[in-house]
Amino acid sequence: MMEHRPNTVLVVLINSKTDFEIVKFQNWYRIPVRNAPPIVRNGTVQIIAFYHTKIFEFEKYSIKWYGNVKRISVVKRKELFPEHEQFDPKSENEYYKIEFAPLIELPAPIISMRQRRLLFIPTTEQKFFNATEINHLFNDSPLEDLLWKYFEEKKIPTERQFYISVGSKNYFLDFAIFCKAKNINVECDGDTHHTNKENVQSDKWRSNDLTKAGWSVLRFTTDDLNYRMNDTISVVNDTINKYGGVQDVNDLDNYKYIQGDDDPQLTLFD
């Protein structure tokens, strides 16, 4: 089993140039108390990093800056913006104010290969300082890390914790694979997950929603991932090829089939 380290880094969203001015020059960031992730609530966050959205022309879809957290406090909005918020109905709303040391620039940005929606990514310092792209950051479960390792080794382009909307419902997919005819959702179901009847029922509705929205859903158990990984990867490969090949993130109009390990002549991107 792969070592699973605790999260001490939080990647947050920056989708406003005004907010980034505050981050850069005043060295604080706000998160509504009702939406704060556990890493903020329990005070274990030591580093805060910033993911830029498409409004930032040169830094969009990347993480370039981070700061070492100095203090976390709960304040009202009117305390954060006293010159503007005294008569705003939101002025009494409570926020975590995360204060940090002056920003530090990463030697190379952590990029997102696809335009993606995210709010928070808790991760470890080891993953953060070694990541080259967003998918390297996620630290949700050892099972997902194990499958991600194999996807990387087999050069299967995937997106981890990919956010999609289906009607009025929102889902984070463990892994999303984009194919020509139909996209694939790969889910890692741990043993504890299967013993909870509510989880099983929720998964059925989730799979039904995704299937209705045009996704193919593959679910793998702890045993599939720990003891039958070759068979698991083979199922994924076959499904990708069934749906016309996987999309090349560097050329979105190009789809390529995956060759098995027994074919010495071709690999995914040769």
Image: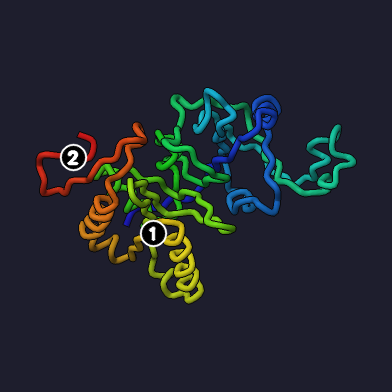
Image quarter for residue 221? bottom left
Mark 1, secondary structure of its residue: strand
Residue at x 22% of width, y 56% of height: 234
Q: Can you identify the residue that label 2 sits on? A: 267
Asked if residue 81 is positioned above or below residue 185 in the image, the reply reads: above
Three-letter code, disc 2? Thr
Color style of the picture: rainbow
Q: Are marks 1 and 2 in contact (CB under 8 Å)?
A: no
Tell me the crowding category of disc 2: few under 14, some 14 to 19, or many 20 or more residues within 10 angstroms, Cα based: some
Q: Which residue is more in the foreground, 24 or 184? A: 184
Residue 16 figure quarter: top right
Counting residues from the start of the chain, the first of labels 1 and 2 encountered is 1
The percent coordinates of residue 231 (x first, y second) are 21, 60
User: Taking 93 as reference, is 84 above or below it?
Assistant: above
Q: Label 1 belongs to which residue?
A: 187
**Left or right relative to 97: residue 137:** left
Give the x, y percent position of residue 38: 59, 54
Q: x, y percentage for residue 102?
A: 62, 26
- Residue sitting nearer the eye, 188 or 242: 242
